[in-house]
Amino acid sequence: QVQLVESGGGLVQAGGSLRLACAASGIIFSINRMGWYRQAPGKQRELVAGITGGSSTNYADSVKGRFTFSRDNAKNTVYLQMNSLKPEDTAVYYCNADIQFSPYAHRDYWGQGTQVTVSS
């Protein structure tokens, strides 16, 4: 079984910074895709930033230039450095990963979510 454990959320004033981390643990053959999503109250869950395959990183237009996605392959961990935070960044942030747990099988996993609240 695979678990995604998130950390780093909290309350911050507008203009501040937070760093989220997501560590994958368990039986992991390889990681096909890993990224961050967020869901604000009354809104659909949306991709914030993520990496697919080798090194292609995608960002939502609303966070480009403010958020930076990074990964530590040795630790099966991804990070989201969030700078210049705005009240509209307030949401529950979820880690998502498509993990190969054998050479022939993979599955999509979600973390439990971490709350990010940006006050004005």
Image: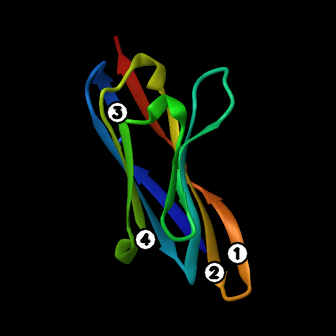
Q: Is residue 7 left or right of residue 109?
A: left
- Name the amino acid type tagged 2: Phe
Q: Is residue 30 above or below residue 44?
A: below
Whichever of callouts 3 and 4 sits on the residue coming sooner in the sequence is: 3
Whichever of callouts 3 and 1 sits on the residue coming sooner in the sequence is: 3
Q: Quadrant of residue 44?
A: top right
Residue sitting farthest toward the right: 104
Q: Secondary structure at mark 3?
A: strand
| Mark 3 neighbour density, 10 Å: few (under 14) some (14–19) many (20 or more) | some
State the separation of the CA atoms marked 4 and 1.
Answer: 16 Å
Q: Identify residue for label 3.
A: 10
Q: Are marks 4 and 1 in contact (CB under 8 Å)?
A: no
State the separation of the CA atoms marked 4 and 2.
Answer: 13 Å
State the separation of the CA atoms marked 3 and 1.
Answer: 32 Å
Q: Secondary structure at mark 2?
A: strand
| Mark 2 neighbour density, 10 Å: few (under 14) some (14–19) many (20 or more) | some
Q: Identify residue for label 2.
A: 101
Q: Which mark is residue 76?
A: 4
The quadrant the N terminus occupies is bottom right
Q: Are marks 1 and 2 in contact (CB under 8 Å)?
A: yes
- The residue drawn where x is 30% and y is 33% is 83
Q: Which mark is residue 106?
A: 1
Whichever of callouts 1 and 2 sits on the residue coming sooner in the sequence is: 2
- Name the amino acid type tagged 1: His
Q: Are marks 3 and 1 in contact (CB under 8 Å)?
A: no
| Mark 1 neighbour density, 10 Å: few (under 14) some (14–19) many (20 or more) | some
Q: Which mark is residue 41?
A: none
Q: Is residue 60 left or right of residue 15?
A: right
Q: Is residue 65 above or below residue 90?
A: below
State the separation of the CA atoms marked 2 and 3.
Answer: 32 Å
Foreground pick, 43 / 112? 43
Q: Is residue 120 above or below residue 63?
A: above
